[in-house]
Image (cartoon, helix red, strand yellow):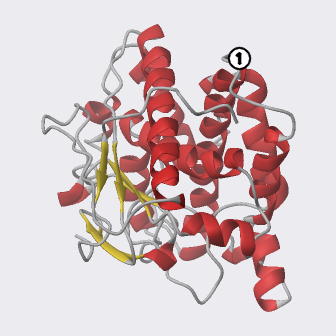
Amino acid sequence: MRWKGRRRSSNVRDVRGSGGGGGFRMPSGMGRGRRAGGGIRLPTGGRRRGGGGFGLGTMIIIGLVLWFLGINPLTLLGGLGGGIGGGTGPSITPKTSSPQFDRKAGTGGKQDEMRQFVSTILGSTEEIWTGIFKSYGKKYPKPELVLFTGQVRSACGFASAASGPFYCPGDSKAYIDLSFYDQLAKQFGAKGDFAQAYVLTHEIGHHVQNVLGILPQFNKMRRRMGKVEANKMSIKVELQADCFAGVWGYYVNREGWLEKGDLEEALVAANQIGDDTIQRRTQGYVVPESFNHGTSEQRRKWFKRGFDTGRIESCDTFS
């Protein structure tokens, strides 16, 4: 990727070395993301209760359409059984606090370059999603990216580096331990800077879902789902974040960021972190009902769909 020399985001907070404070899929036996509703893993709720009405997918699409028409879907959906997201429900408005970029001791060399890289990728997502939202007459509230080592505490709870990168809707922040990128390359065989960018833009895709009201609605309604049903809906949420990452890819490609082989890097990464591929690697067999991020084929398909179209309307994984 031709990322060097481009604008870096100021919405990065570096807490590495400070002791900490769902997302991308990691193998079974490693840490899992907390109840982020858009991190490495979206938790399942309790026993399903009966009841009629619209299905969740239909309600999410209705909410998406209403939002673009200028009607806050949270106003309407909030009456369907309590507050959206409970006590950690996200705000639809931008944060008022000033983000900061702390420089911690003990960083440098490759880590410093990776910090510059993720800051640049985040900056590009800010520009692209601000432009997309503006085209609909909306304002894009920029998320903050938190860099940590080992462990971190977010509004969604405590997480370790083993959880992988994750997004917390409770504080509208994405979190990443940069050592994940080494694991992505060495353990998963997904190398290259565009593969790394895909990881981060997937989490920013969850932020877009959060702003649209999709994550809050899922987090509320999953409480009425059984485990298998919640896993199926989680897959749709995750695949949509993949598609949104692809939409970002469409625009940076138009802007001349990509080089030969970059797209293949992202597709390889999507393939390597599919539920079926990870289960075959870690346990030798697959359990489809336990999938919660999507198969390798699905993840490739939805990233490529966003990449080919550049339109968020093409990312309807719920129909």
In this image, 82 relative to 288: left or right? left
Position in image of residue 265 (x %, y %):
80, 49
Q: Residues within 10 Å of mark 1 (few under 14, many from 20)?
A: few
Circle 1: element type: helix
Q: Amino acid at mark 1?
A: Arg
Depicted 277 relative to depicted 255: above or below: below
Depicted 54 relative to depicted 175: above or below: above
Extreme residue in the left direction = 97
State the residue in front, 59 or 42: 42
Q: Please name the residue shown 77% across and 33% down the image.
A: 305
Which quadrant is home to the C terminus? top right
State the residue in front, 204 or 52: 204
Extreme residue in the front direction = 109
In this image, 186 relative to 81: left or right? right
Q: Is residue 275 visible?
A: yes
Depicted 84 relative to depicted 147: above or below: above
Q: Please name the residue shown 47% across and 25% down the image.
A: 129
Q: Write down the quadrant of residue 248 in the picture.
A: top right
Q: Please name the residue shown 42% across and 33% down the image.
A: 8
Q: Write down the quadrant of residue 27 in the picture.
A: bottom right
Q: Is residue 158 visible?
A: no
Position in image of residue 271 (x %, y %):
81, 59
Position in image of residue 132 (x %, y %):
50, 17
Q: Write down the quadrant of residue 141 in the picture.
A: top left
Which quadrant is home to the N terminus? top right
Q: Which residue is mark 1?
A: 254
